[in-house]
Image (cartoon, helix red, strand yellow):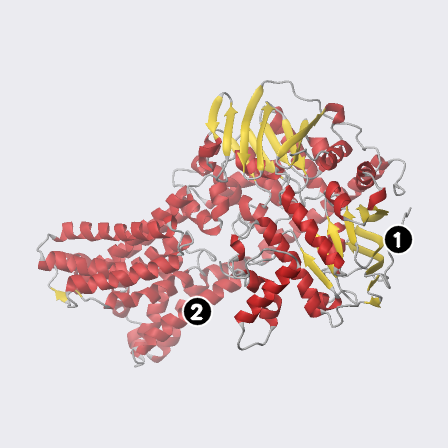
Amino acid sequence: MSTGQTSDPIAAYEKRIAALEAKLNSLEESVILRTAHETETFDWKIWAERFGLLIAWGGMILILGAFKPDQMFAWNSYASMFGSNAMVVVLTLALMIPLTTGDFDLSVASVMGLSSMLLAVLNVKMGMPIGGAIVFVLAAGAVVGAINSFFILYFGVHSLIVTLGTGYFINGVILWVSNSNTIAGVSMDLVKAVILTRLFGIPIGFFYALALSVLVWYVFQHTSLGRRLLFVGRGREVARLSGVNVNRVRTGALVASGVIAAFAGVLYTGMRGASDPSSALAFLLPAFAAAFLGSTAIYPGRFNAPGAFVAVFFLSTGIMGLNFLGVDSFVQNLFYGGGLVIAVSISQLIRGRKPMD
Amino acid sequence: MRSETTERVGDTDALDIRHLSKHFGGAVALDDVSLTVRRGEVHGLLGSNGSGKSTLIKVLAGFHTPEPGAEIRLYGQSVPLPIPGAKVRELGLAFVHQHLGLIPSLSVTENLFIGSLSTGQDWAINWGAAYREAATIFVRFGLALDPKAPVGTLSAVQQALLAIVRAYEDIRRATENHVDRPGVLVLDEPTPFLPRAGVEQLFGLVRQCTQLGASVIFVSHDVDEVREITDRATVLRDGHLIDTVVTANTSHEAFVERIIGRNMDAYGGANKQARVASTAVSVRSLATAGVGPVTFDLSEGEILGLTGLIGSGFDNIPALLYGARKGTTGEMTIDSQRFDLAALNPIKALEVGIAYLPADRLGEAGIGSLPVGDNVSMPVYGKLRGALGLTDRQIGRHARKLGHEAGVKPNIPSMSLAALSGGNVQKALMAKWLQIGPRLLLLDEPTQGVDVGARQQIWDALDRTAESGAAILVSSTDYEQLAQLCHRVLIFARGQIVAELSGSELTKDMIAEHCYRSMPQIA
């Protein structure tokens, strides 16, 4: 019944194990050699991946500058572009936090619009001091984040569906509280604190966005909280089994997203001294495009603040340049929409074209 | 040695496999296996893990290309090799796997006709006719299934029955001359998760299929079930065909003997004596659906193995003790602290020093797309913080040190975890948990898919951890590993502990024998 075995199976096995071990060691050595070799010779590739977007930005400025040197090489153009895109940077940061934990927040632009409108209503119509009104609208952003996380986590509905719905709901609330009117005459203190004060010719609002980017970068890169956000997004089950309170992290990310989006609304109102019921909603796609384009740069493969920061200004430089060339405003849609699809495609290439989860 | 009889010879055999071999690299999974399955026969296929059963099934399903020289005939006609996977049904083969391949949210009828619905070109499906046809089929097999019910609402048994009927019907529709080629159904471990009454029902259906002329290959670990349902049975061991026997003439012991072989255990008994240290962990009345209640203790410094056949429930225990699944009841005491298992969760478990390394390395234990450094540093981020917070450099330095101690190769913390080999992933993930100095370490299949060298390193690490006083629980189906690694092994069957082996009794063969022998007698 038994098949022919050697009389001494232990010795035979041990011989095989020894032979395998020798082979394994030699293979390991060659792997180490190869990886060491790769890290040396392929350094430029990693470098190019990290800074490719910055290089492309510079390249774009040069190309556009060849056609319109007067405008493209003027500091003033950039100063005003930096200032007027501050709230896009902030909105992108708001979006990036839940994206890192694996949740989409389509309601960010609506929260920005809501906060902008509430600020105007409270300050202009109800005469609330601007400071108190700002605190109130930031709290409103937190409430929206909490509502989103309640439906996502308690009912287990996909974040895309929940935030699509809450976003649309909020759009209705904006029209309601504003009676569908633009409200002007917001406190000049806010306008001064956002746009009239300038540093190096750039409206001060830009520096708020820059500071917030640095803060988000620090949290993502240099705190255990930031790493936990990443773990939750990449492997929810692994994170759970490693003792991370996954639900708390996701809730925190959505609430933070709401507060930061509300802050974007404050900047937006301050920039114009007024609020209209609909224009903020147009910033959803630019924020998505910048978040995804940014995830291909600086820390490729991760949503990251410096990447998002560069991506916002890469996209807006392109639009500014095309405007100088006299192209119509439809170019914005082309640029942001195309930018989003191309950015996601590039990040898929980095991931080796595995299907997105 | 062959002991074939010629009691029931059809016109031609249903399935005739000749000289089937399959190598994976240097490993021989199947070595010159020949067997025949007759018309209307239930043919058992037995063997322990790694015996070549699954490879044989996968060759039949067209997943694997056999080595040249093999020949497979169905009803006397040679089939092309590799078997074209898309045409297995037309050839007269259908498979029912343990995961039945049913879609729970669709109706019974949609599932039954899923093959023709997904490839058909109908522009107007006549649902009334489909329901009537399904009902007719169920009447023919004597099944009380509602054609409109969603499959998810059926019991496990009903789902298994539906999957078998579907396989039979798939062959009937696909073969042109069904009377001459009634088909071969391959049932791959269909029973481990079914209650006893359900197994009876399933066997009834199998007999009906054979009365209609079909042949059935019944793959199972369970010797009793094979003896009950099969006419003949083939036993594989280490890729060799050991014997094809007439079931009625073969005792339970004779089967077990063929499955586990008569080779004396290489190590002739455990290298480790049972620990007599004080009890570190005690588990009382641990239970969840299909498991328990079970009660056992672990001593300080003890490595306790859990094993059994598929479906016996042993593999759930580590996750349950970590509080990773809901619906657990029972009590656990660690260092005289008592916990209600129903209220335990991973965060609490970690606080009291329990660590759990799941078997699914890149799905539950580690994140493949993140660097090794982040993966292994996860539990100790708080301690790695410097003045300016956590930096990649600190994480890298810490991970390189851990990786060096654990023998992770290549030891490059910035590499993604998925880029490491299975053995090195496991070494890294073990190091992740060993660094927190767990009181109780729970491991599920710690060396599955791990090369020999890495396996030894993992064992050494576990030995060191145990010597330092931790209690270690290992669930595994690798009997040899358990015999060498553990102080004591508990054997599970149908959710209960049925045997405990230690000392000189703790050998690979004794574990195998108890796994196959000790089906508990449940009234």
Query: What residue is at 41 percent from the left and 37 percent from the top?
Result: B386
Disc 1, SS? loop
Q: Position of residue A141 (x, y in %)?
A: 25, 53
- Distance in Å between CA atoms under marks 2 and 1: 69 Å
> Looking at numbered disc 2 in the image, what kind of residue is underneath it?
Val
Task: Name the residue type under label 1.
Answer: Glu
Decide which of B18, B269 is in the foreground and name it: B18
Where is residue A26? Give x, y as percent.
73, 47
Marks 2 and 1: which is nearer the front?
1
Q: Quadrant of the N terminus of chain A?
A: top right
**Tag on residue B7?**
1
**For residue A203, what is the image quadrant?**
bottom left
- Judge by depth and name the residue closer to the eye, B233 or A251: B233
Q: Where does label 2 land, which residue?
A: A341
- Taking depth in this image into account, of A110 and B16 the one nearest to the observer is B16
Judging from the image, mark 1 belongs to the subunit labelled B
Q: Is residue B289 above or below residue B500?
A: below
* Left or right, residue A182 beside residue A258: left
| Crowd rating for badge 1 (residues with CA inside 10 Å; few <14, some 14–19, many 20+) | few
Q: Which mark is residue B27?
A: none
Determine whether, in the image, residue A116 is placed left or right of residue B411: left
Regarding mark 2 in the picture, which secondary structure is present there? helix
Q: Is residue A61 visible?
A: no
Q: Quadrant of residue B469?
A: top right
Q: B322 and A78: which one is in front?
A: B322
Q: Choose top left, top right, bottom left or bottom right for residue B448.
A: top right
Residue B106 place in picture, x, y as percent: 52, 61
In the depicted structure, whether residue A194 falls above or below residue A66: above
